Image (cartoon, grey):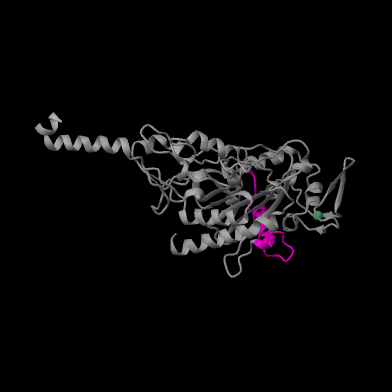
Amino acid sequence: MKSFITFGSLAIAVMMCSHSAAADRGKILDRHGAPLATGNGGYPAANAAAHLIGYCPGGEGQHGHGGIEEAFDAVLARGESVQLTINRQLQTSTYKILQESGKRGAAVVIDPENGEILALVSYPSYDPDKLTKEDLKEQLAALSESPNSPLLARATEGTYPPASTFKVFSSLALARASKAGAQICSGTTEIDGKNYRCWKSSGHGELSGIGAALRNSCNCYYFLAAVDLPVSALVDVARTFGYSSPSGIEIKESIGALPSGNIQNAAIGHGTTKVTPLQIANAYAAIANGGALYKAHLIANKEPEKIRTIADEGFEAAHLEKVRAGLIEVVEHPEGTGRRAKLEGGMRTAGKTGTAVISDNHYAALFAGYAPVDEPRFAICVLQEGETSMSGGQTSAPLAARILAKADALRKTDP
Ligand SMILES: [Zn+2]
């Protein structure tokens, strides 16, 4: 106080500075400047962004946990704000769509032109606003014991079989090896004394190539076409599209596992292959934009960073075009397995369904795709988990349609 009397204005300046450094944590903002974390313990998107943002129960000397709060703890602790590529409205709407479905799951929306993540949602979730410093341990213990694992960031840390969404990459591996010709599906295929089944027991008949195989999501096509394909060809294509590698995202993520072992299982996205919903969305972003894999990222105003161009890995533009045509048919053809992803009167959508049996009573249903088909602005992955049999086409494709319609509406009013 002595210095306050003697050198008034200087003392006041010093006091204000030390006050703000101790009490005000930086904010976390969305792409338009809307707050996702207020810096003083408020989380306006609440459950909708908990895994993405993390939490930092107030008080001096506290550190952020999870998501951006943890990854950028030092920056936020200095009082600096962090701006994200996320659109808060899309994040919140996507969360509501998953919540209404009532199933555990995740949804990711990425801009395929630059790798910006527009929405990154895991469900179920928790409310970071309600976590208090005093009984944080007890609250976290209760959440971690909850049977639906609300603390698990499914979008980035959950790993799942890609199931039939992987047929896109198997198709490219077959095309590169000149094995993408016609096959006949009779419903079952015997290879080396083992029987493999298509999901359509009556068979798909003759399929002219990878476009028709994708549209019908025919298993037998891949069993037969891949019969002499080494599994290393699938490993190559999986790696090319970013599987089993960090996506670039600035928060924690799992990297998953590559195909191995039986080529028939691997070719239809089962077996050892494990991927995160974020990796699937980013791989489909590369399909959408004509073959550039970008680093997926959350921090705004970054120069887009290309990881690789698939043409450099020996994949021809014509092969990618066939795959893209197949993905349009998945949604637009009357027999397409993803027709529920169609936006009536809205953007034309392309994509692929997938259904995985993880264990006896654990299923996952997927839809991965992009829109609009001619000038893609959104790549998407929706994953739903449950205890009873479900399919990507029935369960996840309609949610993808709703999320894409919302993304398009927001882009028009609030890019
Ligand atoms: Zn078939």
Q: Position of residue 204 (x, y in %)?
A: 82, 58
Whereabouts is ligand 1, in terms of quadrant?
A: bottom right
Q: Position of residue 134 (x, y in %)?
A: 44, 35
Give 144 or 360, whichever is nearer the viewer. Answer: 144
- Residue 293 versus residue 385: which sits nearer the camera? 385
Residue at x-position 50% and y-position 33%: 137
Q: Residue furthest top?
A: 2
User: Residue at the location (47% across, 45% down)?
Assistant: 298
Q: Which SS does the magenta portion mostly show?
A: helix
Residue 59 appears at what percent x and percent y? 37, 36
Q: Position of residue 63 (x, y in %)?
A: 42, 34
| 223 left or right of 71 in image | right
Query: Which contiguous range is marked in magenta?
Result: 313-340
- Give the farthest residue toward the right: 193
- Asked if residue 297 shows in the view, the reply is no
* Quadrant where the N terminus is found in the figure: top left
